[in-house]
Amino acid sequence: MQASIIVLVILYLLAAALLGRWADRRLAAHDRLPMQWGLNGRPNWSAPRRPALIVTPLLSGAGLLVGAVLILFASGEPNVRESDILGLLAALAVVGIGVYAGWLAFVTRSARTPKRRQ
């Protein structure tokens, strides 16, 4: 099971890195990226491009990594099947990548939208 968990974490990191690299190239013309949107659809605040692209997968990956470390270094036999543990970690990885991809979709849409003058 340990090898499966390590492979899952590596796959998550690879997927996040590939998405981040794609987004960095696509959004190279933008110094800052929106991080949060208000109810009016306008960004509330923004962050420098590269840190913004790194923070989101790190936050979602933190839960995956904490879960994986706790499982890998837990003492004794777990009360659940290995497939259940791997399923939980896989679900965390998929949700994390989904959140990152969703945020990137908002960011790229926001980057294409012409800014209105106020």
Image (cartoon, rainbow, N blue to C red):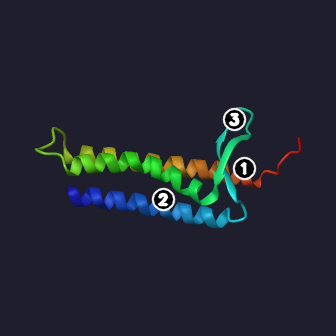
* Residue holding disc 2: 16
Q: Earlier in the sequence, mark 1 or mark 3?
A: 3
Q: Check disc 1 and report the residue beneath it.
A: 110
Give the residue number, with chain letter if any, for mark 3: 38
| Rendered-image quadrant of the C terminus | top right
Mark 3 to mark 2 CA distance (whole Å): 26 Å
Residue at horizontal 42 percent and vertical 50 percent from the top? 61
Question: Could you give the CA–CA distance between mark 2 and mark 1, rounded to whole angstroms?
Answer: 21 Å
Q: Residues within 10 Å of mark 3 (few under 14, many from 20)?
A: few
Identify which residue is drawn at 54% across, 61% down: 19
- For residue 103, side relative to residue 31 (left or right): left
Q: Nearer the viewer, residue 22 or 32?
A: 32
Q: Which of marks 3 and 2 is nearer the N terminus?
A: 2
Look at 67% across and 53% down and name the residue there.
Answer: 33
| Image x and y of residue 81, in percent | 19, 43
Q: Is residue 50 left or right of residue 86?
A: right
Judging from the image, what secondary structure is the residue with disc 1 in? helix
Q: In this view, does 43 lie above or below 113?
A: above
Type of amino acid under label 3: Gly
Q: Quadrant of residue 45?
A: top right
Picture quarter with the N terminus:
bottom left
Residue at the extreme left: 76
**Mark 1 nearby-residue class (10 Å; few <14, some 14–19, many ≥20):** some
